[in-house]
Image: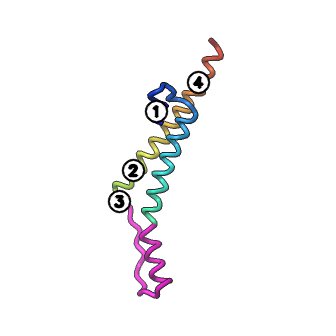
């Protein structure tokens, strides 16, 4: 993605797709990091007969900030896609 931006094709479909894939990967990692402790407790409780404990799910401020940054990158990718479409329309007029 960075090579494409350096080459001047910042609004190419591949660049926008790469940005969306990167953000989707970060969101997937964030989701898996959040549910992993709860899944581990469930496995210990039901799989190995451990004592029943309350199931806790927590979200830190860092995770919320990362979620906000990912949403911002999705908006930027959508704007890049729209800018590409407008540029293609303008090329047709010239």
- Residue under label 1, please give it: 3
Q: Is 90 placed left or right of 31 in the picture?
A: right
Disc nearer the start of the sequence (3/4): 3
Q: How many marks?
A: 4
Q: Is residue 12 above or below residue 93?
A: below
Q: Which mark is residue 60?
A: 3
- In this rendering, the label closer to the viewer, 1 or 4: 1
Element assignment for label 4: helix
**Mark 3 to mark 1: distance in Å?**
34 Å
Image spot of residue 87 (x, y percent): 57, 22
Element assignment for label 2: helix
Where does the magenta region start and end?
36-59
- Residue under label 2, please give it: 66
Where residue 69 sits, quadrant-wise, is top left
Image spot of residue 25 (x, y percent): 49, 51
The residue nearer to you, when weighing 85 against 57, is 85
Within 10 Å of the Cα at label 3, are there few (<14), some (14-19), or many (20+) other Cα atoms?
few
The residue nearer to you, when weighing 41 against 75, is 41
Within 10 Å of the Cα at label 4, are there few (<14), some (14-19), or many (20+) other Cα atoms?
few
**Mark 1 to mark 4: distance in Å?**
23 Å
- Residue under label 4, please give it: 86
- In this rendering, the label closer to the viewer, 3 or 1: 1
Element assignment for label 3: loop
Image spot of residue 4 (x, y percent): 49, 31
Disc nearer the start of the sequence (2/4): 2
Disc nearer the start of the sequence (1/2): 1
User: Outermost residue, left direction?
Assistant: 61
């Amino acid at each position: 993605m960075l090579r494409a931006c350096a080459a001047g094709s910042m609004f190419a479909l591949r660049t926008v797709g790469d940005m969306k894939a990167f953000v989707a990967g970060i969101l997937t990692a964030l989701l898996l990091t959040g549910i992993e402790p709860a899944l581990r407790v469930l496995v210990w409780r039901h799989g190995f007969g451990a004592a029943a404990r309350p199931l806790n799910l927590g979200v830190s401020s860092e995770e919320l900030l990362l979620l906000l940054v990912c949403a911002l990158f999705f908006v930027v990718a959508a704007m890049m896609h729209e800018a590409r479409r407008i540029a293609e329309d303008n090329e047709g007029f010239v």
